[in-house]
Image (cartoon, coloured by chain):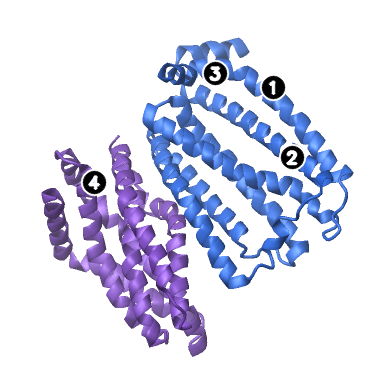
Amino acid sequence: MHLFLSVLNRDLMLAIRRRRELANPLVFFIIIVSLFPLGVSPDKELLREIAPGVIWVTALLAMLMSMDTMFRSDYDDGSLEQLLLLPGPKIFLIGAKITAHWLSIGLPLVILAPVMALLLYFPSHAIVTLMITLLISTPILSLLGAVGVALTLSLRSGGILSSLLILPFYIPVLIFSTMAINAAADNLPVSGYYSLLGAFLIISVLLIPFAVVAALRVSYN
Amino acid sequence: MMQFIHKYGSPRYFYQWSAPWQFWLTVLSVILLAVGTYWGLVIAPPDYQMGDSYRILYIHAPSAWMSMFAYMVMAFSGIIALVWRIKVAEVVIGQCAIIGGSFTALALITGMLWGKPMWGAYWVWDARLTSELVLLFLYMGVLALYSAFEDPRTGAKAAAILSIVGVINIPIIHYSVEWWNTLHQGPTVTKLDKPSAHISMLIPLLIMFVGFKTYFFALLFARVRNGILFREKNASWVKEVLELKS
């Protein structure tokens, strides 16, 4: 637990020191969402219809863009190797790094999403659902992304490859989240979707750190 | 058990014992595929609703089935490769990804060709088609990762981890896609998939299933043997084998 907290503390400190770099995925998110009215049509009804999908796909891409920051700089300067040499379970170390990534990218996205939803004329009573789905699901995205990054860490062009590996695994999250948002927009009950996403989150938290540790071992060979 | 795995998994011994298997599986698959194709395309009666166009089923269904089977074989050999570090299992992962991906592509293409006369469009966002497409993405990911590393052993291990993560995810993806589709589209399409087949149509289908399976293993043996020779090209036994052949 001590390991978890100190690594988390370190990573968050680093994130705050590099806040300009950190803002890039968020700016990316804003720009891409605002491209859709320009590219599709400024029609109110149409935008409202596609808003959940647009926001979700864009959030997903913004998360992917930022995945590389999770291990890359630590890998390049060798501190990740030193961290892995520490005694104690590696799971806490990995967990702390993923938590720090989520706190610095996922959480700001959750807060930013309602603003972008309003730009797309999304009905205000469904915005809470949008935020809750993002709140449950962005940690899953961080966790799954960590596997992809860890697997491709030792490759030079790892970024695009890790996106290719991980995107298919994002499909269930995307489906359930957008279905929940659409249901909320139609005033239908959404708690079932929350339960499914929650179940997915629990499974991911329990299993994925092991896969990440195994993947890092392979990367260090 | 351990001795057994290590013995049969050593590249040199595997190369020896797999030769007769490869030969007889090839013979068997050629016979079964020829019989099944003729029976399915010529002898079996036309469907009362779909006419003759249903006959693509005899290629489509077995290849869809094999696309999933190959993934299971790949993930299973991934576990073996990670736990016991068997070299042959590492080769199997890469070859399975190629063969399985081809079967997936074949299932998708035949499905699209079948969809045109049946649904009036080449592509429908049907649950089964969509999850087959996702499966193709997964195969492409495994293959890309497998070949991305300079050291083939590292690539094989990375691909093994990815395919194991994929195996846990495939049912989740499959059911989420199914649910997404049924709520959006209604069951007009899914009914077509399981026409309660008459026995005269079922027998050639079963022959094709077995034929595809033997073909898969014959191809896998051939490719893995080839891959072993390539990977062990500096070993003395490989040089002996190659000298014998030439």
Q: The blue chain is which one?
A: B
Give the mark nearest the N terminus, 1 or 3.
3
Do the residues at discs 1 and 4 belong to one chain? no
Name the spot of residue A112 as percent of width and height, x first.
30, 77
Q: Residue at x 31, y 58 (%)?
A: A142
Give the mark nearest the N terminus, 1 or 2.
1
Closer to viewer: mark 4 or mark 3: 4
Q: Mark 2 points at which residue?
A: B206
Closer to viewer: mark 1 or mark 4: 4
Q: What element carries label 1?
A: helix
**Dot 3: chain letter:** B
Q: The purple chain is which one?
A: A
Amino acid type at image mark 4: Ile
Do the residues at discs 2 and 4 belong to one chain? no
Q: Mark 4 points at which residue?
A: A91
Q: Mark 3 points at which residue?
A: B15
Q: Is residue B152 above or below residue B194?
A: above
Q: Report the front residue among B89 and B235.
A: B89
Q: Report the front residue among B219 and B4.
A: B4
